[in-house]
Amino acid sequence: MGYGNYAVADDADSELCLGGYTFNNKSNSAEYEKEVAEAVKDIKESCSGVFLKSYFYELVSVHLKYGNKHDAIKIIKMLLDYEVNIQNGDFVKTKRHAMYGEHNEDEYPKIVELLKSREFLNSEAGKLYTKKLREIEKRRKEAIARIAKSPSDYKPNGSVIVKKGACPGECCSYELAEWNVVEDTDLFDKPNGKKVVARVVKGTPVVALTGEIHVTPVPVMVDMDVEVYVENVSGEGEICNKHGALIRDGEWLTLKAGDVYYLLDYVELGAYNFWYRGCEYWGALGVKERCLFPGEYCSEEYIYPEKRDNMINWVKIKVNDGKQTLEGWTREMSHFRVMTQCS
């Protein structure tokens, strides 16, 4: 069955362990045989029960590299049979991978092409995949209809929420981190400013003074009941007493099937700030781009997955050019190498 970013085999003899795996090598290429053997070896070595999806994507990519769509589709079908929740985000890098702690080291453009191809869509795997996508679209339309009928405070105020002083991600730090410029960068007078007040060049050490996150709330639909342990990061006490529910700091909040919450900013270790029925909470969430197979390991999905990159991180930088000390703002986080206690 599917398990988030993993595939789970029932036992070592499972088909998913690729025991006795064979494929059609029409080219009789020794290099093709070698690359398939290496990919299969990675899968088998992790055959204690949990497999990273990327192991299978590597095998699919090898088949596609050598023009073998037939065997590539067979592997995709196997994943679908085991209810693995294949995501578009599995195959491409997005800014979320850096800003939200999602680590996608590889890109698989050929798999993206495969999932759109006539050969795949006409296959048994393709028909199942298409059916599941239609079910997702139906759930999204139903969720949008529920939003339209919900009380106004079910949605947070403002199209953009500014979190001053926030620093996203594990071990994120301003004052305690060592920042170095890896790409020439303009600094502006303020967040969203137009006036360039300084320019830092590659190789320059700088100081990060503070930052702020500009968040666009993104609606997430809940497919089955989920218990979320919530905390109030500002201190102990009551978090929310609205719509007939009193939720205190350090209690479990039940998100019910059919509910919609709004994802705000990522904090750390799978925890987000989020808005639910008139109140803001902090807790660990399991939101996914989509759930082909809704269930225990995929129970929350974006209504608008194309909008999931919802956070812009502005940082105030101080630099001394040898003559004077200058300060300015940037949103180009990839232009800096940040060394923290976790680096």
Image (tube, rainbow, N blue to C red):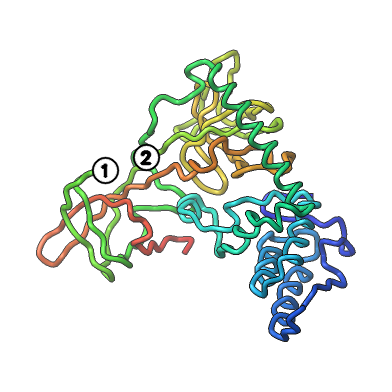
Three-letter code for the amino acid on which mark 1 is drawn = Asn
Which labelled disc corresponds to residue 214? 2
Residue at image coords 25%, 50%: 329
Question: Within 10 Å of the Cα at label 2, are there few (<14), some (14-19), or many (20+) other Cα atoms?
Answer: many
Q: Residue 80 versus residue 156: which sits nearer the camera? A: 80
Residue 92 percent across, percent down from the top left: 54, 58
Three-letter code for the amino acid on which mark 2 is drawn = His
Q: Residue 174 versus residue 146: which sits nearer the camera? A: 146
Task: Give the vertical position of 300 relative to 58 (above or below).
Answer: above
Task: Give the Cα separation between the discs numbered 1 and 2.
Answer: 10 Å
Residue 1 percent across, percent down from the top left: 79, 50
Residue at image coords 76%, 78%: 26
Location of residue 33 (image quadrant): bottom right
Q: Are marks 1 and 2 in contact (CB under 8 Å)?
A: yes
Residue at image coords 27%, 50%: 316
Left or right of residue 308, residue 195 in this image: left
Q: Residue furthest left?
A: 323
Q: Residue 138 versus residue 185: which sits nearer the camera? A: 138
Q: Residue 163 versus residue 194: which sits nearer the camera? A: 194
Which labelled disc corresponds to residue 192? 1
Task: Give the vertical position of 328 relative to 338 (above or below).
Answer: above
Left or right of residue 119, residue 215 in this image: left
Q: Secondary structure at mark 1?
A: loop
Residue 208 percent across, percent down from the top left: 30, 54
Q: Residue furthest right?
A: 13
Question: Within 10 Å of the Cα at label 1, are there few (<14), some (14-19), or many (20+) other Cα atoms?
Answer: few
Left or right of residue 294, residue 333 in this image: left
Which labelled disc corresponds to residue 84? none
- Dot 1 or dot 2: first in sequence order is 1
Q: Residue furthest bottom?
A: 30
Q: Secondary structure at mark 2?
A: strand
Residue at image coords 15%, 58%: 325
